[in-house]
Structure formats: C-alpha cells, structure tokens
Image: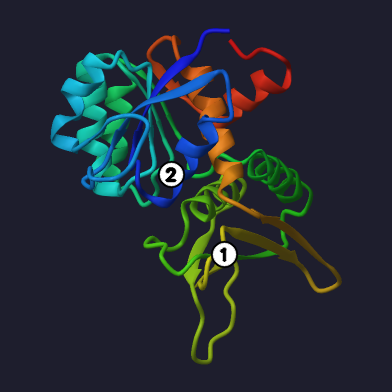
C-alpha cells in the first residue's frame, strides 16, 4: 500500500489535532507537515507558519493538504496548492462565494475535495432526506443543528448542505429562528442553531403535515468520525486527476472496495 504524505492546515486546532492523532493509528497516511500561525508546539513533524507553507509543501514532498482552518485562510491555501501541484481536501465551513470560486478554479489544476461534513452517517442522512422529500413533497420542514460553543459560523456547513438538498426538491425560503406573532408561510424552512458546551455536532430534520411527523437525526459522538472520513478522502484523492470531487465519490468507492 502506498502511504499518502499529508500536510495538515490548521494543525493545532481542534480538528487539526484530531486528524494528526488519528493518522498515527493508520498505515495508509502519514502526516509530514503541519501549518498553523502557532508554530511553537510539540510535534513529531515540522509545523510552519502559513507564510512558509508553499516552500514547505515543495521540500516535504506532500501529496495532499488536509484543511480544517478558517474561511479566510482557504483562498491563500488553494493558491499554494496549485502553485505546488498538491491535492486539497478541505472541511473548512463558512466559505463565501468568492472563496468557492477560488476552489473551483483550483480544481482545474489540482484535485480538490471540499465537504461540510466527512461523516459517512451524514452522507446517509442526505440520502435519507432526499428519499423523504421525494415521498413527502408537501410536508413542512424544520431544521435544528447544535454544536460546541466555540463554533463560529451559523447555520453549520452541514445544515447548509442539507438545505441545498431541500432546495433541489422545492422552492424554499429559509427562516433563521422565529419570534413575534406570525403564521408559518408555505415554503418556509425554519433553521435553528444552538451553541453549547462541547457538543460535536447534531442535526435534526423534521418533516410534518397535519397527521404525522418524520424526524431524521444524526449525532456525532466524537471528532474522530470526521477525522477518519477526512483521512479516507485524502488517501483516496492522492494521485487523481485535477477536478472537483465529493465525499459521495469517496465513500462510494471505498464501500465497494476500491480504495485506490
């Protein structure tokens, strides 16, 4: 098995550290470099500042950068990846349209995979939601997501992806929270975000009419599930042609036994 050499962008953050720790338990990937504004931390591999990233990607012979950082850090990272011909896997959320366009442009030169969630369970949740929407076209929809108190963007990236799935089926208008006295309008999707404690991530979708209700729920018990998915994606993406890829591509192949 070829071992994929990784750089972790956002190396000392919550997810960056979890990815680095999880990688040590696997034979298919190895973290050879960390990137963080905070470089004075103990590590088995070099940790460099973002300003030194491009040179380090070249000298360390990196195959894939795994990114869990901040939205404003993604654009310069994408440019460094294209300059060094290194694939990019990013789970950073809260991206604006300009940054999304930069990722799309980068995918013309290197393999790029951006996802709001790397959990196999969330991919299954999306598929279940897709089926439920097809079967229940007139049901009201409400979405609730809960994350740890340190999460900056709301609604979560995963919630946004789930809303995009809803929009594939019907014309909707998101209502973020409710207050006052007003009737629910047709086509509204209520979106509610909670931030508390150390909750890893919970997403609940309610579909209801006058006679019944269906609830679809996913709860992450640890950050490890996201780290495993991101590392699976990184190993899968290494060596592929330039283009835009998704976690659905990764999980479809690895589930069927194609991990190359």
Q: Measured from the top left, where is residue 165 in percent x and y? A: 58, 46
In this image, 138 relative to 10: left or right?
Answer: right
- Farthest residue in the left direction? 51
Residue 99 lies, with reference to residue 248, above or below; the image says below
Label 1: state its secondary structure: loop
The quadrant the N terminus occupies is top right
Q: Residue furthest right?
A: 211
Nearest the eye: 204 or 214:
204
Picture disc at residue 17: 2
How is the rendered protein coloured? Answer: rainbow
Vertical order, 92 against 85 (above or below):
below
Residue occupying the point 15% across, 30% down? 52
**Residue at 33% across, 42% down:** 42
Mark sitting earlier along the chain (1/2): 2
User: Which residue position holds label 1?
Assistant: 199
Disc 2 on helix, strand or loop? Answer: helix
Q: Mark 1, residues whose alpha carbon is within 10 Å: few (<14), some, or many (≥20)? A: some
Residue 256 — which label? none
Q: Residue most toward the bottom?
A: 181
Give above or below for 58 relative to 125. Answer: above
Are the residues at dot 1 and dot 2 in contact (C-beta closer than 8 Å)? no
Q: Position of residue 249 (x, y in %)?
A: 58, 23
Mark 2 surroundings: few (<14), some (14-19) or many (≥20) residues within 10 A = some
> Residue at (48%, 18%) from the top-left corner?
237
């Amino acid at each position: 098995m070829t071992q994929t050499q990784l750089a972790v962008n956002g190396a000392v953050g919550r997810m960056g550290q979890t990815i680095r720790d999880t990688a040590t338990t696997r034979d298919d990937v190895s973290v050879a470099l960390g990137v963080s504004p905070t470089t004075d931390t103990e590590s088995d591999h070099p940790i460099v500042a973002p300003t030194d990233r491009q040179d380090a990607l070249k000298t360390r012979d990196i195959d894939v950068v795994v990114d869990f950082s901040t939205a404003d850090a993604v654009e310069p990272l994408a440019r460094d990846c294209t300059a060094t011909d290194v694939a990019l896997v990013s789970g950073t959320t809260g991206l604006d349209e300009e940054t999304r366009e930069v990722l799309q442009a980068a995918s013309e030169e290197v393999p790029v995979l951006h996802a709001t969630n790397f959990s196999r369970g969330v991919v299954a949740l999306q598929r279940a939601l897709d089926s439920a929407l097809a079967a229940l076209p007139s049901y009201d929809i409400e979405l609730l997501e809960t994350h740890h108190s340190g999460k900056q963007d709301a609604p979560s990236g995963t919630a946004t992806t789930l809303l995009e799935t809803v929009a594939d089926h019907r014309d909707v208008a998101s209502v973020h929270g409710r207050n006052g006295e007003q009737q629910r309008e047709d086509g509204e999707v209520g979106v509610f975000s909670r931030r508390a404690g150390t909750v890893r991530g919970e997403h609940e979708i309610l579909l209801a009419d006058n006679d019944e209700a269906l609830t679809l729920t996913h709860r992450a018990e640890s950050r490890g599930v996201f780290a495993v998915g991101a590392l699976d994606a990184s190993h899968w993406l290494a060596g592929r042609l330039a283009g835009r890829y998704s976690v659905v591509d990764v999980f479809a192949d690895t589930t069927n036994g194609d991990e190359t």
